[in-house]
Amino acid sequence: MQGPYKPGTPCWVDLMVPDQQAALDFYCDLFGWQGEVGPAEAGGYSVCTLQGKPVAGIMKAMNPDGTVPDPMPPTVWTTYLATDGIDSTVKSVTDAGGTVMVEPMGVMDLGRMAVVADPTGAVVGLWQADTFGGAGIVNEHGALIWNEVVTSDLPAASAFYSSILPVTTARSEIPGAEGYIEYQVDGRAVGGMMDLSTFPPGVPPHWQPYFHVDSVDDVQAAAVRAGATVLAPAFDMVAGRMAVLADPQGGSFSIITSSTQEQPA
C-alpha cells in the first residue's frame, strides 16, 4: 500500500484481548507477523508487522485509567474506516442514528481515532491519518484482504455508511454472488455486507476482517493446534476458499485464499 486510503475504505484492524502476549504469540505464529508489547506511553499497544510493514494492532483490554475492566469486554477485532475529517464524520454518525462509543481523540502524532456503532449495533472505528496511514501491506499471506459488516438490517446499514462517508453499496455482479452486497468507494468494491439472518442464533452485528493465506486448510489446522476454534470449516465459495475461526481468546476472524485478489484500498 503506497498511498493514503480513500475516505470510507477499511484501512486498519486491531484486536483487544485480556492476554496481549498470548494473542501476539498466536497471530505471529499463525501469520508470520512480528510483534511485541508496545511502549508504556502508547498503552502497550503493539503494531504487528509483516515484511517490515504494519499489518494489524493488538492491545490489552483496559480502562482509560489503566485498570482492568470488570467485567472483561469480549475479545473482538475492530475494523477502522479512513476519514479525512473525523470530527464531521462523528457528528454525522449521531445525525444518522448511530452511537458514538469513543469520541475523537489524538493518538500521539499518528492520527486521530474514534469508535462508533451503526444503527444495527455493529461497532467500527474511524481513523484520520497523520503520520500513520494504516496497513502498509495487503493481499499477501497473513495480511488483510477484506472487511465485511454483518448486520440485521441491510438497508439501514447501507443508508448509514453512505450518509457518514463517501461510500455506496450495490449488489455484486460477480456470477454466483449476485445477492452479495458490495461496499464501494469510487465505484470499487473495498468490502462487503452480509445479512445476520444467515448466521447462527446469538451472533451480534459486527465487522469481520479477512486475512489472505496461501492455504486455508493448512492455516485452519495450525490454528486448531494452537487452541483456536473453527466456527465455519474450510469451504469453497465464489471468491475462493475460506474458513471462519475464533482465536483462543474468542476473537473471530476469517481466512481466505482469494481467487479475485480484491484489495481493501
Image (cartoon, grey):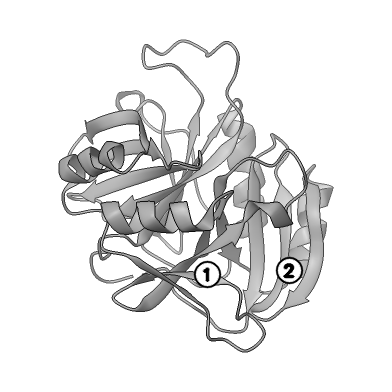
Q: Residue at x 64, y 41 (%)?
A: 251
Q: CA distance from mark 2 to mark 1?
A: 24 Å
Q: Nearer the viewer, residue 129 or 90?
A: 90
Q: Is residue 118 left or right of residue 26?
A: left
- Element on which disc 2 rests: helix
Q: Is residue 23 left or right of residue 112?
A: right
Q: Position of residue 4 (x, y in %)?
A: 23, 64
Q: Is residue 6 above or below residue 232?
A: below
Q: Nearer the viewer, residue 52 or 249?
A: 249
- Cβ atoms at labels 2 and 1 below 8 Å apart: no
Question: Which label sits on residue 181?
Answer: 1
Q: Position of residue 150 (x, y in %)?
A: 58, 53
Question: Which label sits on residue 216?
Answer: 2
Q: Is residue 43 above or below residue 33?
A: above
Residue 98, picture quadrant: top left
Q: Is residue 255 above or below residue 22?
A: below
First in sequence, mark 2 or 1: give its number.
Answer: 1
Residue 107, picture quadrant: top left
Q: Which of the two discs, 2 and 1, sits closer to the camera?
A: 1
Answer yes or no: is residue 143 visible.
no
- Element on which disc 1 rests: strand
Q: Residue at x 69, y 42 (%)?
A: 203
Q: Position of residue 158 (x, y in %)?
A: 42, 58
In the image, what residue type sits under mark 1?
Ile
Q: Residue at x 60, y 25 (%)?
A: 18
